[in-house]
Image (tube, helix red, strand yellow):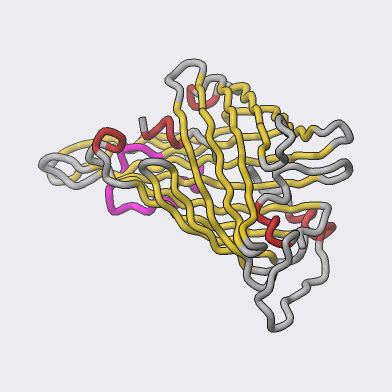
């Protein structure tokens, strides 16, 4: 089940040249932590965009878990999903875009190994010996999916946004076609705090449906730093931050810890490390 979780939702690096086109003069806060109502929207400013607006996003979700073994050392398995996404607005109250998903997996590695080994991008199997026991570590990587997405505002209440993704398998890593649906909700509290949530389902056509429900809560400090906390009901807790290098360039980091609920994670000890880069053609504040 944990392998399917990593298939979520959630990108390669040809972006550096684009960054140079989007740079904007930094505007730092002027000794006051007061944030305007429209500024707090940086948490969801790219969720629904108007005509002429667009964004490019590169995001990594690294799911890693320690797997206890009997009579030998623990094992580690790590699954990284890199999303490269382009989304644009239109004049028909609709946003659309295209996503590319690149995955790198390492299964049955030594427990003391680094989860960042997934970024070595290897396709091979290695035989190991630990405490007299032989085991095989498998390395895989490849572009697994290409897909389109559509976002709409389904209700008069503008706090809701619906998104539909369809991911077509490239045949790499034995990955099948996937349908992903999300309903997002956003709310500003006292012009200072943003509550953002989504409920959705990740549905591999060749596997089991995986529903989820996430809630994020955060604030913005001096227009540059946006710390937040996250809960993915009922099993995952996380914290992270958005960092705005300029009005158009954003970095995001998040670390999550999975609660030891045996019916979900078994005896494993999973965590996730998330980081991304977002570029827009509009100012975020």
Above or below 252: residue 11: above
The answer to if 20 sits in the magenta stretch is: no
Determine the residue positioned at 87% across, 41% down.
51
Q: Residue furthest toward the top?
A: 206
Compared with 208, 113 (above or below) is below
Closer to the camera in the image, 233 or 165: 233
Q: Which residues are magenta?
A: 106-121
122 over 148 or under it: above or below? below
Residue ID at (33%, 52%): 113
Residue 32 locus on image (x, y percent): 68, 80
Which quadrant of the view contains residue 197? Answer: top right
Q: Give percent across and percent down for residue 176.
A: 52, 20
Q: Quadrant of the C terminus?
A: bottom right
Instruction: Say left or right for 70 vs 197.
Output: left
Instruction: Specify the farthest residue to the bottom.
Output: 31
**Which residue is nearer to you in this view: 55 or 191?**
191
Q: Quadrant of the N terminus?
A: top left
Tell me where residue 92 sits by quadrant.
top right
Q: Is residue 17 above or below residue 224?
A: above
Camera-side residue of 158 and 137 = 158
Residue 190 in percent (x, y) is at 63, 62
Find out whether residue 118 is within the magenta segment. Answer: yes
* Quarter of the image where one finds residue 248: bottom right
Residue 224 in picture, x, y percent from top left: 67, 69
Relative to the observer, which residue lies in front, 151 or 160?
160
Residue shown at the point (45%, 37%) measured from the top left: 6
All told, the count of numbered labels is: 0
């Amino acid at each position: 089940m944990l392998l399917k979780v990593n298939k979520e939702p959630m990108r390669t690096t040809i972006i550096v040249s684009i960054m140079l086109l989007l740079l904007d003069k930094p505007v730092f806060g002027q000794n006051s932590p007061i944030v305007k109502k429209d500024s707090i929207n940086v948490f969801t400013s790219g969720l629904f965009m108007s005509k002429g607006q667009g964004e490019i996003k590169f995001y990594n979700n690294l799911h890693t878990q320690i797997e206890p073994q009997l009579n030998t050392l623990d094992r580690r398995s790590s699954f990284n999903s890199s999303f490269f996404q382009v989304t644009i607005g239109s004049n028909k109250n609709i946003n659309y875009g295209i996503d590319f998903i690149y995955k790198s997996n390492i299964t049955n590695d030594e427990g003391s190994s680094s989860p960042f080994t997934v970024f070595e991008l290897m396709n091979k199997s290695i035989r190991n010996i630990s405490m007299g026991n032989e085991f095989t570590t498998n390395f895989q990587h490849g572009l697994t999916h290409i897909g389109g997405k559509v976002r709409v505002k389904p209700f008069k209440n503008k706090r809701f946004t619906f998104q539909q993704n369809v991911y077509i398998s490239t045949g790499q890593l034995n990955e099948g076609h996937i349908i992903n649906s999300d309903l997002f909700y956003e709310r500003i509290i006292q012009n200072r705090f943003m509550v953002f949530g989504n409920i959705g389902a990740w549905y591999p056509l060749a596997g089991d449906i995986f529903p989820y429900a996430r809630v994020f809560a955060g604030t913005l400090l001096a227009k540059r730093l946006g710390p937040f906390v996250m809960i993915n009901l009922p099993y995952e807790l996380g914290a992270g931050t958005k960092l705005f290098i300029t009005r158009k360039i954003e970095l995001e980091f998040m670390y999550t810890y999975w609660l030891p609920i045996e019916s979900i994670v078994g005896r494993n000890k999973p965590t996730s490390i998330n980081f991304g880069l977002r570029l827009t053609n509009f100012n975020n504040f």
